Image (cartoon, helix red, strand yellow):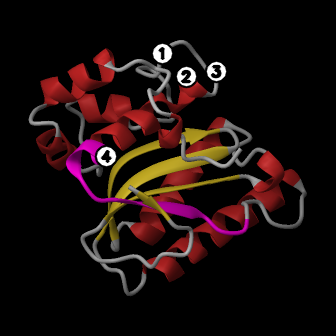
């Protein structure tokens, strides 16, 4: 796993993409904000990335993606962030940047890192003391992934990385919520 905030995106590469509100402030103020964020994400990014996992926390977000088209992804992320920021600024009668200057990305280069990143993303609500269990957190991909309902998430491909749906669930259930390595904590303090 390599953290480099300025690394270019490459086609077929996995990335953990994340960012937080400017000065650690909220980026989601209501339930509808979470859904609007995901709808804009789909609108602007679904043609150039595949999404494997996500978690939205009141002041930040995480996505595990694989790039489909690296030629347009940076511009599409910029348009997505601008569109969402404009909506929140209007809603909250605020001005200025909603997000920290650069969104971050970590290159994921092996299956073990992919598995841990998925767990890290899903366990984020517990890490930030938003509940005792991540399994029922409303703004995470975990429930969508384990359900049988239609989803745009790459459920089958993700389960394949864990060898099965059952192994995916077991991996999540067996891991200690407090991650074993400080080097795995990848957010800015």
Distance from disc 2 to disc 1, alpha carbons, whole Å, reads: 6 Å
Callouts 2 and 4 close, C-beta under 8 Å: no
Give me the disc on residue 44: none
Give me the disc on residue 129: 3
Distance from disc 4 to disc 3, alpha carbons, whole Å, reads: 24 Å
Distance from disc 3 to disc 2, alpha carbons, whole Å, reads: 5 Å
Secondary structure beneath dot 2 equals helix
Callouts 2 and 1 close, C-beta under 8 Å: yes
Residue 187: horizontal and vertical position, in percent?
A: 60, 47
Say whether residue 135 is left or right of residue 111.
right
User: Label 4 belongs to which residue?
Assistant: 113
User: Label 1 belongs to which residue?
Assistant: 133
Secondary structure beneath dot 4 equals helix
Give me the disc on residue 126: 2
Q: Residue at x 24, y 71 (%)?
A: 12
Say whether residue 61 is left or right of residue 49.
right
Q: Nearer the viewer, mark 1 or mark 4?
A: 4
Q: Residue at x 62, y 22 (%)?
A: 130
């Amino acid at each position: 796993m390599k953290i480099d905030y300025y690394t270019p995106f490459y086609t077929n590469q996995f990335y953990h993409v994340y960012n937080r509100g400017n000065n650690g402030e909220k980026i989601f103020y209501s339930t509808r904000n979470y859904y609007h964020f995901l709808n804009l994400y789909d609108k602007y990014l679904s043609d150039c990335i595949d999404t494997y996992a996500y978690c939205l926390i009141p002041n930040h977000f995480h996505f595990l993606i694989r790039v489909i088209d690296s030629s347009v992804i940076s511009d599409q992320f910029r348009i997505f962030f601008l569109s969402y920021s404009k909506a929140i600024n209007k809603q909250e009668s605020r001005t200025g940047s909603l997000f920290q200057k650069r969104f971050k990305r970590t290159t994921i280069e092996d299956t073990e890192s992919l598995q841990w990143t998925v767990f890290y993303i899903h366990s984020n609500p517990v890490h930030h003391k938003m509940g005792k269990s991540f399994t029922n957190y409303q703004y995470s991909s975990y429930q969508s992934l384990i359900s049988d309902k239609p989803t745009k998430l790459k459920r089958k491909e993700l389960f394949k990385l864990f060898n099965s749906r059952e192994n995916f669930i077991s991996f999540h259930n067996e891991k200690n919520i407090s991650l074993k390595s400080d080097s795995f904590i990848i957010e800015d303090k």
